[in-house]
């Protein structure tokens, strides 16, 4: 694969305000946790890693909509309940995170199947980056993929460089969608130790979803996205008007990671899909809780956030992988 090496492995992010509260919380718990910490490999790691592993903090970014799919602002902690594997959890931290820095990966399918639509897709992606990237705060990278992924522009807040990379894309070859997601998440969205300030990680995937070249499976790509805590927003390039297998793949990737899939019928509708993604990113909430399951068994644990007001729907990642040690 044509990806350079990058930093690896972290399981959680914490907002700057949340971090300060956590330090106080960890100090208060130091006595009761010191014995357990002395037997844990995490005890020799950095303070950030200790916070993530030893106190079992689980952070979740999410959006809330009504039945008309309108985004709902100004909700509070008392408007929600959270469950892990159907067991109720206490919400320890809550807030809105529209200003938290973004790290955005733009993955564009350049296979032969989208050749006629590539021009529209490139311009819509450029317009989106111009709208969403805040110099000095946000950064993005660009990956084109057909048979295999190619990193065309590494992380930068220079929209001009990102735009130039997108303009250079040319169609040809098969579709290695799962490989592109797997490597973008593994090489570009997993950090160790976690960065300061903590980040929102987003993948924008533009494809028809019809993978026919990947060495990695759907499950492997999804698991890597979940480990990276990357939110996938997918934009389908299928213009047939018929829901195809690839559309279902894109929708499932988005649903499981707390994002959304869009199916614009006309290429000219792409701009509207990108606009809605930008609006969602500016309307996110976060919550965090200490998991009642303290086992470090590496299992996948399902998260459910229940809105207490009628007619509301929460869009959040399906769960997370517990630390394995």
Image (cartoon, grey):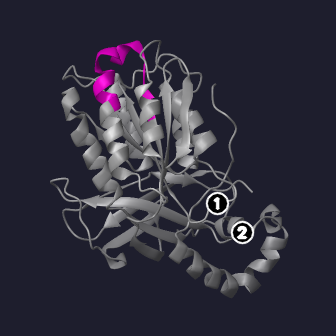
For the point 71% across and 53% down, the residue is 324
Q: Is residue 260 visible?
A: no
Query: Disc 1 vs disc 2: which is toward the camera?
Result: 1
Q: Distance between the residues labelled 1 and 2?
A: 11 Å
For the point 47% across and 12% down, the residue is 173
Q: Say which quadrant the C terminus sits in.
A: bottom right
Q: Confirm whether the magenta stretch covers residue 108.
A: yes
Which residue in the protein does label 1 denote? 194
Q: How crowded is mark 1: few (under 14 residues within 10 Å), some or many (20 or more)?
A: many
For the point 37% across and 31% down, the residue is 206
Q: What stretch is highlighted in magenta?
A: 107-122
Q: In which quarter of the image is residue 116?
A: top left
- 28 displayed left or right of 73: right
- 203 displayed left or right of 1: left
Please tell me whether residue 104 is drawn above or below residue 41 in the rendered image: above
Between disc 1 and disc 2, whose residue precedes? 2
Q: Is mark 2 on a helix, strand or loop?
A: helix
**Residue 239 placed where, x, y %?**
23, 22
Q: Quadrant of residue 216?
A: top right
CB contact under 8 Å: marks 1 and 2: no
Main secondary structure found in the magenta portion: helix
Which residue in the protein does label 2 denote? 50
User: Of all residues shown, which one is farthest toward the left?
Assistant: 68
Q: Confirm whether the magenta stretch covers residue 225.
A: no
Q: Residues within 10 Å of mark 2 (few under 14, many from 20)?
A: some
Q: What element carries label 1?
A: loop
**Residue 184 placed where, x, y %?**
56, 37
Which one is nearer the viewer's eye here, 149 or 134? 134
């Amino acid at each position: 694969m044509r990806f350079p090496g990058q930093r690896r492995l972290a399981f959680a992010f914490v907002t700057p305000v949340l971090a300060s509260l956590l330090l106080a919380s960890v100090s208060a718990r130091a006595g009761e946790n010191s014995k357990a910490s002395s037997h844990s490999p995490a005890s020799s790691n950095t303070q950030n890693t200790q916070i993530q592993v030893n106190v079992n903090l689980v952070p979740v970014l999410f959006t809330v909509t009504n039945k008309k799919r309108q985004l709902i602002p100004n909700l509070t902690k008392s408007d929600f309940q959270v469950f892990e594997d159907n067991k109720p959890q206490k919400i320890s931290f809550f807030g809105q995170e529209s200003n938290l820095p973004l790290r955005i990966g733009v993955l564009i399918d350049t296979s032969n199947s989208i050749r006629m639509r590539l021009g529209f897709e490139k311009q819509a992606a450029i317009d989106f980056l111009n709208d969403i990237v805040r110099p000095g705060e946000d950064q993005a990278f660009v990956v084109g993929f057909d048979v295999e992924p190619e990193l065309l522009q590494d992380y930068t807040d220079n929209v001009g460089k990102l735009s130039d990379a997108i303009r250079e894309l040319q169609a040809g070859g098969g579709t290695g969608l799962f490989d592109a997601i797997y490597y973008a998440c593994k090489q570009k969205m997993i950090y160790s130790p976690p960065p300061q300030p903590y980040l929102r990680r987003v993948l924008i995937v533009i494809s028809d979803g019809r993978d026919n070249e990947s060495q990695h499976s759907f499950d492997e790509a999804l698991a890597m996205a979940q480990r990276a805590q990357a939110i996938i927003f997918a934009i389908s390039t299928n213009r047939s008007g018929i829901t195809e297998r690839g559309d279902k793949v894109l929708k499932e990737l988005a649903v499981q990671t707390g994002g959304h899939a869009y199916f614009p019928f006309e290429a000219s509708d792409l701009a509207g899909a990108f606009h809605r993604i930008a609006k969602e990113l500016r309307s996110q909430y976060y919550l965090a809780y200490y998991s009642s399951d303290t086992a470090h068994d590496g299992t996948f644990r399902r998260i459910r956030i229940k809105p207490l007001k009628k007619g509301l729907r929460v869009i959040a990642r399906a769960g997370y992988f517990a630390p394995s040690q």
